[in-house]
Amino acid sequence: MEHFWNKRDNISKYYLNINNPDYDKALTLAFQLLEEYPDVAQAYSELASVYHMMKDYDKAIEYETKAIELEPNNASFYHSRADSYFRNEDFYNAIDNSLHVIYNEDLKFRTECLSWAYSYNLILAYLCTNQFDLAKEIFDEHIDDDYVYYTKPIKGRITKQRLKNCIDNRINILYDGV
C-alpha cells in the first residue's frame, strides 16, 4: 500500500501547485491510480479531489459517492462531498452530508477539526436556504473560534462575527455580498 500513497502524493503535486496547476497531468495520474487500485476508496477520492480543484463539482460528487460506496464509514469522504455539493449550490445535499458526520460518532477520521468544517458548511447551507433557527442552533453548539472561510456562492470572507450577524439579522448569506 506504500506504493499507492507515493503515487497519490505525486498526483496532488500537480493539482495543488498554486502557481501552475496541471490538471490534465493530475487527471491522467489519478485515472492510472484508479485503474491500478479499483477497490481502494481513496483512489476514487483522489480523482474527486482533482475534479473539485477543477471546479467540476458534478464529477467530484460522482467520484466521492463511489468512494463512500466502498468505504461508507469514512468521514472525510462525506466532508469532501458536502463541500462539492455546497460549491455546486446544492445546499440541501450539503446539509445532509454535513449532518451525517456531525451526528455520527462511529465514522472513521472524524476529528474535532473535521467536525468544525462540517459545522461551518452546515451553517452556511442553512443560511443559504433561509433556515435561520437551525443555523443558530449549530452555531451555538459548534463554533468556538473566529475562523475565516472563503467560498464560491458567497462573496468575500466569512468570519464568525459575520455568520452571527447574518443569523441575528436573518440575512440570506447567498445574496448578502460582502
Image: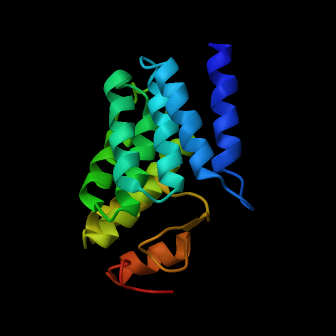
User: Residue 173: x and y, percent?
Assistant: 38, 78
The N terminus: image quadrant: top right
x, y (%) of residue 175? 36, 84
Q: In the picture shown, does residue 5 fall above or below 82? A: above
Which residue is at 65% across, 52% downward? 22
Rendering quarter of residue 99: top left
- Residue 157 visible in the displayed image: yes
Q: Is residue 12 left or right of residue 112?
A: right
Labels in figure, total: 0
- The residue at the point 68 percent across, 33 percent down is 9
Residue farthest top in this picture: 1
- Please report the residue visible at 42 percent of the width from the left and 56 percent of the height from the top: 56
Expressed as whole percent of the image width and height from the top left, the position of residue 159 reads 56, 72
What x and y, as percent, mark residue 42? 50, 28
In the image, residue 156 sits, relative to residue 74, either above or below, namely below
Of residues 87 and 178, the one nearer the viewer is: 87
Frontmost residue, 97 versus 53: 53
Q: Nearer the viewer, residue 155 or 25?
A: 25
Answer with the quarter of the image where residue 19 lies: bottom right
Residue at horizontal 49 percent and vertical 38 percent from the top: 47
Is residue 138 visible in the rendered image? The answer is no
Specify the color scheme.
Answer: rainbow
Depth order, front residue of 94/19: 19
Residue 164 sits above or below residue 33 on the image: below
